[in-house]
Image: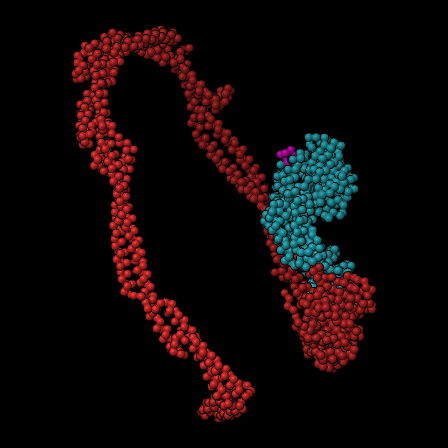
Amino acid sequence: MKIESIHIEGFGHFTDRTFGPFSSPISVFVGENEAGKSTLLAFIRTVLFGYPARGRKDWYPALNGGRHGGSVTIRADDGRKYTVERIEDNRGVSLRILLESGAESRDENLLARLLGHSTKTLFEAIFAFGLFELQKLENVTKGEVEPFIYSAGMGVTNLPAVMKSLTADAEAVFRKSGSVQEVAKLLSQLEEVERKLKTAEGDAAEYGRLAQRRDEIAGEVKAQTEAIGIVDSALRELKRLQAAWDDWVRVNSLEAELSELPIIENFPEDGIARLQKAEDQLASAKESRDEAAIQLERAEERAQALVPGEALLEHEKTIEEIRGQRKRFDDSLRDLPKREGEVAAKEEEIAAGLRELGPGFDAEHLAAFEISAGVRADLDGWRKHLDETHAAAREAEHEVARARQALQEAAQAEEQARKRLETQGQPKLDAATIEARRADIRATRTQLNEYLRAKERREDREFQANQAPLSSPVGVAAASRWPALALGAAGLALIIVALMAGGAVAAIGVIGGLVLLVGAGAMYFTAQRAAPAGPEVPQTSAFDLRLEEARRAEESAQQALATAARNLGNGIPQPADLDRAEAELEPHAQAIRLWAELNSAAQAAREELERRSKRAEECAAAHTGATAKYESAVAGWREWLSVRSLSPSLMPDSATAVFGDIRALKEKLGQLAEARRRVDGINANIREDAERVSGLAVRHNVAVRIDDPASVVRAADELVARFDAARKAADRREQACAEAEAARERLEKLDRRFAVATESITELLQLGQAVDAEEFRHRADTYERRSHASAALRETELRLQKLSGPGEAYACFRQQLAASSPQEFEPRIADLQAQLQELDAKRQDLQREAGSVDSELGRLVSDEHASEWRAERAVLVEQLDECARRWSKLVIARSLLERAQKKFEQERQPAVIREAGSVLATVTGGRYTRVATPLGGEAIVVATTAGQVKTPEQLSQGTREQLYLALRFGLIQQFAQQATNLPVIVDEVLVNFDQARAQRAAQAFAELSETHQVLVFTCHRYVADLFQAAAPNANVIELGGAQPRRLID
Amino acid sequence: MGLRFVHAADLHLDSPFLGLGTKAPPHVGRKLLQATFEAYDNIIRLCIAEGAEALLVAGDIYDGADRSLRAQLKFVEGLKRLDEAGIRSFICHGNHDPLDGWEARLAMPASCHRFGRRVEAVSFDPASPQRATVYGMSYPTQNVRDNIARTFVRADDAAFAIALLHCNVGSDTGHEPYAPCTLDDLAASRMDYWALGHVHTRAVLRPSRPAVVYPGNPQGRHPNELGARGVYLVDVDDAGRVSLQFHAMDAVRWAAVDVSINRLEDEQALLDRVDSQLEEALGASGGRDLVCRVRLSGRGALHEWLQQRSTTTDLLGHLNERWAERKPFAWCERIEAATRPEFDRDRALQAGDFLSEVLAIADGLRSSPEALATLEEQLEPLYGHDRARRYLRDRTLSPDALRELLHEAEAECVERLGEAAS
């Protein structure tokens, strides 16, 4: 296969760049460092074998734009041309193979076939390599060099590392005698779990033993329980006899007692108690009946008694009225004199008040006098009106006085102003005259300035005209510069000499030199300034013309000045004259300003006098009006007073006080009328009460005098007392009647009860078949004793039957009792109880043991540990299996690699080594003639012509690189035999070779180029020359200088 | 009058779960320890709820070698509950719980019949012996290699005959060939229903005359024992026709999550795929907890990432954080990354380079038993190791196992050699 041309669209810094066609079998790319040789190599690898992973050193982005990638056009072994294009964009990487026919394929397999199925690794290791790859072998430690070469030869540069990692990984899982590997750890854990499970098996055996023991205990407990049953039954029998003994004795005694008592049938129940109760009831009934008879008699007596003053009871209503008004009567009698006193005092107070108001006032007038709110408002109105009019009159009066004072002051001021004006007098010049003179002065001063400037100009021109013939030419000044320059040169020389002399002289010399230099400078610049600026020209006629012109201007100005100053007199004035004339005008101007001011002040004073005089007149008129208004108000007020019969001398304030007095008197009149009404009311009450008492007193013979209040009071009290006594007596009689009636009813009831009690005693005696109470009591006692004995017998027999059972069993039990002796019971019971206790203790021991056996069995049964351990064992076994599998895989993988390596070396290495030896002999000029692998070893050795054998480490670096190059030549040939002739691309592989060997190496490449296309990358021109020398048809391609690199993110 | 009974087998009470790649977290571990008991409890409940007249258990009730007291006690407890409910029980023992194995001294309820070392015939219903007879036999010892099915001879005139036996029908069951027999042997027996045990995957080998049935184990304990596990509720009508109704009894279910990495772009896509399968498995489990094995296969971009050991560990941790803590849980016991790189083997074989040599050698080893044997020798250090040997499942590697290992080793070589090329 051969690369015909390369087209880069975008790769590294290359953009849209084409290389080729490569017509020659050897193409040498020459370029400086960074010219793009490595980029080009990477490009070829990328297009043929695909993009490396992003970020790898041979991954080149399209730095300067363009689609990332490009194409390589190849000529295959079959002679056909293919253009292989590989582009990477957003959609990924696309491969396109263009065929000569124009057809297109994207089949990687086609490309793989074209490349002889070589891999990228193989290609990089054998066909496309640089100095780095050659030198890389140097860094590998001894013993690994050869495997590296072999693996490179096999297309797997990492084979040693892979072998090593497989071994390490496998040993991390398992080593035969290891203790820290995964398998060893798992085995330890498994054995630990097994040990625990063994314990659990022990538990199972324990369970069997315990289960058997549990069954045995159950049997023993059963036997014990039966024995206990027998003893317990005997004990119970004995205790039964013992418990029955007392009752048995009692039954016997009760049966004897009953046989002795007579038989009484049907005696009344509780006979004696009932008899006693009937007798008690009879006695009680008799006693109550007697007591009731006495009570009746006494009540009837009280019911017959008389009531004194019974007639008065009919007047209960009147008596109650007298009783009710009794307090009022007393109060009226007590209050009357006090109230009458109050009336008299009030009458006296009113009389005095009226006297104070004046003769026109009596009680009637007072009552009619109006002091309503309207009248009081009138009074307030008058007060206000009088105050206002009075105040207005007073104010007008004051205003008149103030106007007169002002008038007087204005008259004085006018007098003074007039006098000052007269004193000042009229000014001599008027204002217009002064202003005309000032205008003349200003005009004259202007013309004077014009004239003076014209005169000065004329004088300048005259001076210039006189100077013109004396001017020097420029050469004079130039000549004067030469001494300055000479002086400067002397200064400089002095400084140089002084510096060369050194020491103290040097300082003096330098200073002297500097002085000379400064002096020379000054001379030079002076000469320079004196030199004229322009070329020399004739000047006399021009000066004359300009002088004449100035003289004319001066004359014209002088005339204008004379015209302006004619009003000022004295011909041509000087500036001082004009200043003086201006100063003379100033006093006149001031006199005019003062007179005008005084005149204006006098005029103002006159006007003020007139204004104030008019004001004084207005004030006088206002005062007259105000006074008239006040007098009219006073007359109105007096009229108001007289209508109300009040003194005309009263002013509104004093009138208000009088109104207050009148109001007080009117209130007292009201109080007097009220007092009189109260006295009349009291007198009426006294009369009414006295009449009521005297009426009743006369009818019931009680002494009374109606006009004597004390008598009336006594009579009233007597009547009330008599009425109360009569009422009490009547009430007592009525109560006695009611009591007598009740006593009669009770007596009847008690008579009936007595009869019933008598009857019940008779009945009871009959029932008890007794003639009297004593016999009855005797029979009752006998009956009761018999009843008690029978009941006790029944009860005792029942208790015994409870112990024995009824019927036959009871009879049998009585026989047993009859045959027993109570003294035997206690010792026999004690004996049986001891036996029982012993048996029970033994049974309890067994039961406790059964409990603990059951609990232990329960524990064994519920113990989940064994289950957990079994689960754990299962997991560990699984993990062990997984480890074994992983280990096996690694071991087999390593075995596969070892077998492959061995086969590869056995079958392919000899040819490689042979070819390598031939190439090495060529390159070293016959110094080393052979490359070999000693039998059974993996190391490579080289042999000299003298037969000396050296390992690669014993060779110089250059020779060692030549050996590795030779090995690659061998491998290239080998690959060609098996697959295809891929192009060989080398990058700076000859730099460490001496010249002769480099030439021979180039020659070897030239020979290789007969079968393989060779692309050489170098930055050394001599390398290109070497290749051209070895192969004259070699094509040298200039890559140019370093390419600018664009920074990318 | 028809019959109704429940046919169960291979309870393996208190036997551990096998094949777990990692130790379960505590709550899962507890659940797994209880799972066989819960499944048995479900069977007892089913018998009572469905009004079955009897429970038939065809061997391997527990693993005698484990000497688990719990297993035996719980078993008897269940039978007692049946007894109290008036349900009879018929049991026989298999290779895992033979009669000569260790046994706790537990009293069986009166209504339970345990078959002995020889074939016996007992009435299905003692009150009405004419209804049916149950024939059965227990393994006297573990290693029963005789065809004992042939010793089952019908010798009664009852309406229906049931045979209860732990045996291996056919030769390719994937189980040890204990009490081997053929379907023809069973068909020739004149029995009406063969209630078999031993094979853990339920199978109706013959539907009638006689019906030959393996109910499978009621609780899967191995990654290969996937899906619903349970018992058959058997109804026999007056004419002797058998109808079978399967009832899932398992407390925890095994699920396989198989995901191919073909065309999976990134890790998230893989996780999404696994999540969706776990979700689906949980949805189909009827509220049961799940133990899952995730198998990743195929070729794709994720292969390299998955081949790092920490990847599967991290992935497993991540999945269990999400799925093992919920109720019901789906606990992943391991992730098997059996993926392959994007690799064209045929092309590589043609390349003429070192790798092609490796592949050619592997091919050579595969095709020659003698060459394979040389590999086995290399594995001797571990497989012949005194301590390790007794725990390894395969003490000698079969040619198939070696070939599989060879595949994996070859992939490993491709992987490692390719690292420099990538």
Give left or right: position of B399 versus A202.
right
Magenta stretch holds residue B247: no
The chain coloured red in the image: A
Q: Nearer the viewer, residue A572 or A407?
A: A572
Q: Residue at x 44, y 28 (%)?
A: A825
Q: Quadrant of the N terminus of chain B?
A: top right
The chain coloured cyan in the image: B
Residue B187 x %, y %: 78, 40
In this view of the protein, can residue B204 be seen by the observer? Answer: yes
Magenta stretch holds residue B83: yes
Q: Quadrant of residue B184?
A: top right
Residue A530 x %, y %: 50, 88
Relative to A1003, is A412 above or below? above
Give left or right: position of A753 versus B31.
left
Q: Nearer the viewer, residue A605 or A369?
A: A605
What stretch of residues is rendered in magenta? B82-87
Q: Residue at x 67, y 44 (%)?
A: B284
Residue B285 x %, y %: 66, 44
